[in-house]
Each structure stands twice: as structure tokens, then as C-alpha cells.
């Protein structure tokens, strides 16, 4: 967890400006400046270019980087004109500011390195051309192209639109119950979007919420890039894995809950600081499904709750990991009742064909319009045909989509 950002003095701004200028100078040194001796020297590595780009991102993020901020650039693959790795803007351990980090791809062209971080428009283009991009990474990187509106370009918090399906479990083993020690809050504290939550308990083994490719951002911090533009962050880990584009499956072991702050920030009591990202930007947890729970904001950061069917659990309460909800599945929400009637057709004019319990998982074959009903999220005439041939009103089902999830019949 982290809290308020500190202000920087005019002296700090001056020191940071000089550091950024120095980083920028490193980008321009080459044969044209250094003369024939420079031309004869070996081409510089990508670290200086990545560091300069990292300072630029830090400047945009905070207006001016704090005195304790430091670049941590790790080149994990390099061959020929290409380099891949991680770039972290680390803060002071124990500070009230959290680190930020990106994957990078660098390409040397005519003696200088061109750098792109994930979420920037050139990242997807460079990843498609790079000889170092692995087969498992190519489709995932193609979605990290910066096309989703972000706060930087629109002033609006990044959102998932009308589709909040993640296909993710909670970040621990299916069937275990852990404590949500803090509800939705920002990656770095109270700032929007409230993308993060803190969890602890069980066997303390932190696991990937969905399959993808994993990267160690720094000691204690692992990021997994998933499909559909999502990625997830896991921080404060002890004994975390060392990963460099490692393919991981859902539930893969990433490390243990801990208090590690190698890259900065603060941790009070062992836990995993979990963050949700979409297209390389932190995105609000509210409305998203994790482990068949729907995350909800509270009146303030670190409050909030999670909803499974009609059962609501607040911050400090226990969440059972029911596993990932399939993209064509829903969770029955009787809106306070014990069960929902199933019908032989899409409406109350059809006969009752049993019932389904609140909190049950159902699979949707297709949908149709029928009689109108009002549930937790509003009024709808949409009905869903279940895999057993019966029908349930969409008003009593959470699917993550405001509409059909498997087409109309």
C-alpha cells in the first residue's frame, strides 16, 4: 500500500531537471557529435536511451520526479539491433509513493536507439518486427498499443467500456479463502483509478489470476500480461519467481505474500498488493469479476466490497476463490432472494422448469428478448438460455456485460 504523494522543493526540481538533461544528452551522443573517434567506437547500449525515456514518463506522471526516484533499467534480452527488458521508476523504500514500471522494446537504427514502452503506440509495431519477441508474446503485445483512451490523452480514467469480463480468478489457489485486507484503491494510494486491492491469508502463495506471460519488474514485483488487453501486477512478494516473458498458466505460482519494497513504497504487514491494468494503464477494479466476485468501490479508497451473487463482503472480510468465470458464463444474483426460477422459454408466460440457487455459476448458450424484469443492475427484457435448455432473466445474472454474452437466437 501507499498513501499521499509528497511535494518536491524547487531544489529537487532543479536536481531532477539536471538529471533529465543528462539523460537526454546521453541520447544524442553518437558519431555526428563525437567525431571520427566516436564513429570508430562501439555503438552504445540501449540503457541510456531507455533511462531517458523513463525520465520523460516520470516527468509526465508527477509534473517533476521526486528526489528519491531512481531509474531501474534491466535489459533482459539483446541481440543485433534489438533489446527487450523492464524499466521501473523506483521510489524510496518506506516512502508513501509507489513505483511505476513498463516493459520496453528498443531498436537501434542508424546508430541510435528508438524506445517504446508497453501502452505506447509504437510498442505493438516494434514487437511485431523484433526478432526477440516470442511466439507467446506476439498476440498479447499486439493489444498493448495505446489505442484505449487514457487519462494522458483524454483526462478520463481508463475504463473497460461495457465489457468487464476478465476470465480471472483471485490471486491465490482456487478453493482457498483469504482476507481482503484493503478494498479498491489506487496503485499508489488514494488516487484514481482505484485499480488495486490488498489480500493475505491462506497458504500465502500468490498465483496468476489468468494465463499469460510473466515478467519480474524488480525484486518483489511480478507482472503478467494476459489476453484481451489485460495485465495484472503483484507487489510486496517474498521469494518471487524470476521471469522474462515466461509463459504461465492460470494459478501459476508467482511468490509469497510479503512486505518487500525493493522498488519503493511501503507495506504494513505481509500481503500482496494486486493491481489490474488494461492496455498498459491501471483500470478501476469496480465492476470487474475476480474469482466470481464483482469488485465494488466504497465511499473512500481502501473501503469497498466484493459481491458474489447476493453475498457482499467488505474490506477486512473473507473471500472464497471460486475460480475464474468463463466468458460465456454468469453468476446468479437473486438480488436478496434464495433462488431464481428457470423457465421453458424467455418469459414468465412459459412454464417453470426448476430453479437455480443464488451464487450458482451457469453457462449461457444464447439469448433472446422476453418479458421485462428489474434486478440489481436495472431493468431488462433480455433472457439467457442456459446450457441445460432452460431460461433465466438477465436481470438476475451477473455476466460482466450489459447485453448478450453469446449472441442472440
Image: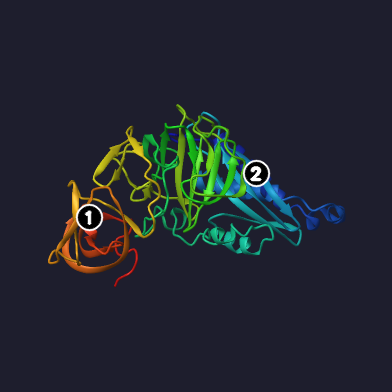
Residue sitting nearer the eye, 348 or 224:
348
Q: What x and y, as percent, mark residue 375? A: 19, 54
Q: Which residue is mark 2?
A: 73
Q: What x and y, as percent, mark residue 305? A: 31, 40
Is residue 73 rendered to the left or right of residue 258? right
Going from N to C along the chain, the mark reached first, 2 or 1, is: 2
Q: Residue furthest left?
A: 349
Q: What x and y, as percent, mark residue 20? A: 63, 45
Residue drawn at (68%, 57%) of the image: 132
| Placement of the N terminus among the 4 image quadrants | top left
How far apart marks 2 and 1 lie (CA) works out to: 49 Å
Is residue 40 rendered to the left or right of residue 216? right
Colour pattern: rainbow
Residue drawn at (48%, 57%) of the image: 229
SS for callout 1 = helix
Residue drawn at (18%, 46%) of the image: 338
Circle 2 packing at 10 Å, graded few (<14), some (14-19), many (20+), is many
Query: Is there any visible trace of residue 25 in the rendered image?
Result: no
* Up/down of 213 relative to 234, above or below: below
Residue sitting nearer the eye, 213 or 29:
213
Residue sitting nearer the eye, 121 or 313:
313
Query: Is there any visible trace of residue 392 in the rendered image?
Result: yes
Q: Which mark is residue 396?
A: 1
Residue drawn at (56%, 58%) of the image: 141
Number of residue marks: 2
Amino acid at each position: 500500500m501507499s498513501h499521499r504523494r509528497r511535494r518536491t522543493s524547487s531544489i529537487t526540481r532543479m536536481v531532477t531537471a539536471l538529471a533529465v538533461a543528462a539523460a537526454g544528452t546521453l541520447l544524442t551522443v553518437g558519431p555526428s557529435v563525437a567525431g571520427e573517434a566516436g564513429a570508430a567506437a562501439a555503438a552504445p547500449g540501449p540503457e541510456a536511451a531507455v533511462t531517458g525515456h523513463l525520465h520523460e514518463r516520470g516527468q509526465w506522471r508527477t509534473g517533476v520526479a521526486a528526489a528519491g526516484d531512481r531509474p531501474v533499467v534491466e535489459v533482459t534480452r539483446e541481440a543485433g539491433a534489438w533489446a527487450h527488458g523492464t524499466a521501473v521508476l523506483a521510489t524510496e523504500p518506506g516512502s508513501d509513493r509507489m513505483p511505476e514500471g513498463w516493459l520496453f522494446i528498443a531498436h537501434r537504427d542508424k546508430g541510435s536507439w528508438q524506445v517504446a514502452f508497453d501502452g505506447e503506440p509504437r510498442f505493438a509495431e516494434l514487437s511485431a518486427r523484433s526478432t526477440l519477441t516470442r511466439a507467446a508474446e506476439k498476440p498479447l503485445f499486439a493489444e498493448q498499443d495505446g489505442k484505449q483512451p487514457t487519462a494522458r490523452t483524454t483526462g478520463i480514467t481508463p475504463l473497460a467500456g461495457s465489457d468487464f469480463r476478465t476470465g480471472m480468478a483471485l490471486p491465490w489457489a482456487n478453493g482457498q479463502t483469504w482476507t481482503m485486507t484493503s478494498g479498491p484503491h489506487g496503485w499508489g494510494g488514494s488516487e484514481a483509478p482505484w485499480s488495486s486491492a490488498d489480500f493475505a491469508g491462506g497458504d500465502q502463495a500468490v498465483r496468476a489470476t489468468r494465463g499469460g506471460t510473466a515478467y519480474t519488474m524488480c525484486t518483489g514485483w511480478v507482472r503478467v500480461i494476459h489476453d484481451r488487453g489485460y495485465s495484472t501486477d503483484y507487489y510486496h512478494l517474498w521469494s518471487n519467481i524470476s521471469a522474462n516473458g515466461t509463459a504461465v498458466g492460470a494459478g501459476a505460482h508467482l511468490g509469497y505474500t510479503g512486505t518487500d519494497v525493493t522498488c519503493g513504497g511501503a507495506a504494513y504487514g505481509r500481503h500482496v498488493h494486486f493491481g489490474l491494468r488494461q492496455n498498459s494503464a491501471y483500470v478501476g477494479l469496480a465492476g470487474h469479476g475476480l474469482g466470481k466476485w464483482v469488485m465494488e468501490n466504497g465511499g473512500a479508497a481502501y473501503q469497498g466490497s466484493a459481491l458474489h451473487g447476493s453475498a457482499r463482503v467488505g474490506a477486512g472480510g473473507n473471500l472464497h476463490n471460486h475460480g475464474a468465470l468463463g466468458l460465456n458464463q454468469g453468476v446468479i444474483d437473486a438480488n436478496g432472494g434464495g433462488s431464481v426460477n428457470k423457465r421453458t422459454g424467455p418469459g414468465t408466460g412459459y412454464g417453470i422448469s426448476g430453479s437455480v440457487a443464488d451464487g450458482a455459476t451457469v453457462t449461457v448458450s444464447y439469448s433472446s428478448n422476453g418479458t421485462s424484469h428489474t434486478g440489481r443492475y436495472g431493468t431488462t427484457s433480455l433472457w439467457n438460455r442456459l446450457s441445460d435448455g432452460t431460461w433465466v432473466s438477465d436481470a438476475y445474472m451477473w455476466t460482466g456485460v450489459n447485453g448478450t454474452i453469446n449472441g442472440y437466437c
